[in-house]
Amino acid sequence: MRFSLLASAALFLGVRAAAVAPAPIKAAVPSPDANGKYWIHAEGISAAFVPYGASLSDLWIKDKNGIVRDIVTGFDNASYYTVDTQHPHFGGVVGRYANRIKNSSFEIDGVKYKVRPNDNKTPEHPEGLNTLHGGPDGWDWRNFTVASYTNTSITFSIVDPDGKEGFPGEVISYITYTVSKMQWDFKMVAIATTKKTPIMLSNHAYWNLDGFANTETRLALNHTFWLPYSGSRVDVDNILIPTGDIIANRKGSPNDFWSAPKQIGHSFNDPELVNNCGYNCTGYDNCYLVDRPTPFNWRKDGPVARLQSAWSGIQLDIYSDQEAFQMYSCNFQDDTMAIKKSQGIFDNAKFPRTIPKYGCFVLEVQDWIDAINQPQWGRQDKHIFGPGGDPYVLQASYRFSINSTATPA
């Protein structure tokens, strides 16, 4: 029976045996494959996860030619996540507070808290000026527990103790990933059990819808991107800390992805894109607001974002209950990180088997960044949680389809 399931997987995926996803696991006790990965499967999709950071490590979809593509970055073996020194947050749950915290500090009910810095390091501040993704030992640096596991779903849990990284109070969180036909859903729930504390989570998967196998270019700038509800964004300074202002994404400007879909590389010759992602940085690392009409059913009334590749034909529509969306264009990848064995151009030396600058994108559903330090925005109830109150909840649905039509820039 085991052999026939593997053979069926190979037939579905259409790739050589070395890259075949394991068969669905039906054991009562959660069990990873030989590489330490937990696989879930549904029609047209296979996904693998590792406990380290509750990370998505593989996601396989057939392209327009029926060839399977592994379209997220990651490592071949789960053990490498714990020893990788670059730590690009591949596929992990970033928390307890995603994105940046200004001056690594915030205030709750008149009490000021200082958390561990790890971003924007300088000679005067060798540990950093700000805190990024929960600090130097944030959630995606830690091993989660596998709480439940079926053929189509896996739930991870973590207990974040009071005082960890300087955050007040204990937080208990459950992260559930589920697949159905051509669809990956996740739900993140976090409960503050002892004190009021900031909570904002996200998944930090890196995407390349060509599986790094595009024979024409190593870059992913030819991917088409659309943010239909994002006519504005959070203004940031030259180290990507919010200034408190909300600014318009002018029609036709580099940050205009709302008026019509366009290729992400369309504006790379526009001087306005220089410093768009921080000082001396050309590209994107921006928090776009999601301004939808009310009432709005986030599951049915349309995606907050769309990414599409004409080369592979794979289209990703992202549905979410969150009110912001961060897009990062892999500005700091530098060809030192290897792609997986399941990716790239097999038996072809045309391109190195590494991730180049602009070779991928991070697409994060979340709320307005650093809102804990911007009380004028009136979003404290979406960022500060305490015992006896509602839990933090994030829900998202990543839906795949084939659309081989190139969208004009």
Image: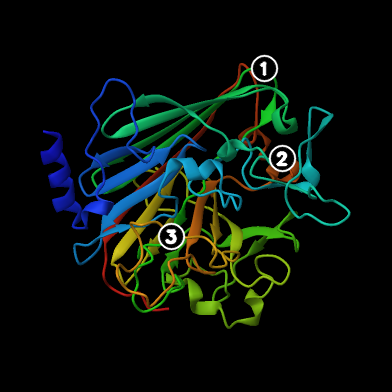
Which dot marks residue 339? 3
- At horizontal 36% and vertical 79% (from top left) the residue drawn is 216
Q: Which residue corresponds to mark 1?
A: 194
Give the percent coordinates (x, y) of residue 265: 50, 75
Above or below 239: residue 160: above
Task: Work out whether mark 2 precedes mark 3 in sequence or the reverse, and give the earlier one.
Answer: 3
How far apart, in angstroms, are the residues tagged by discs 2 and 3?
A: 36 Å
For the residues carrying marks 3 and 1, which lies nearer the camera in this image?
A: 3
Kind of residue indicated by mark 1: Thr
Let me know if residue 353 appears in the view: yes
**Neighbour tally class for label 2: few under 14, some 14-19, many 20 plus, Cα within 10 Å:** many
Q: What residue lies at 13% left-to-right and 52% top-to-bottom? A: 11
Q: Secondary structure at mark 2?
A: helix
Type of amino acid at the residue the image marks with label 3: Ile
Say which of 302 and 221 sits in front: 221
Pinpoint residue 336: horizontal percent, then vertical percent.
55, 64
Q: CA distance from mark 3 to mark 1?
A: 42 Å
Circle nearer the N terminus (1, 2): 1
Q: Earlier in the sequence, mark 3 or mark 1?
A: 1
Secondary element at tag 1 = loop
Q: Which mark is residue 38?
A: none
Tell me the quarter of the picture where residue 169 sits. Answer: top right
The residue furthest right is 124
Position of residue 86 measured from the top left corner of the image (x, y, whole percent)? 60, 53
Do the residues bearing badges 2 and 3 touch, measured as CB atoms within 8 Å? no
Give the quarter of the figure containing the N terminus.
Answer: top left
Decide which of 231, 135 is in the foreground and name it.
135
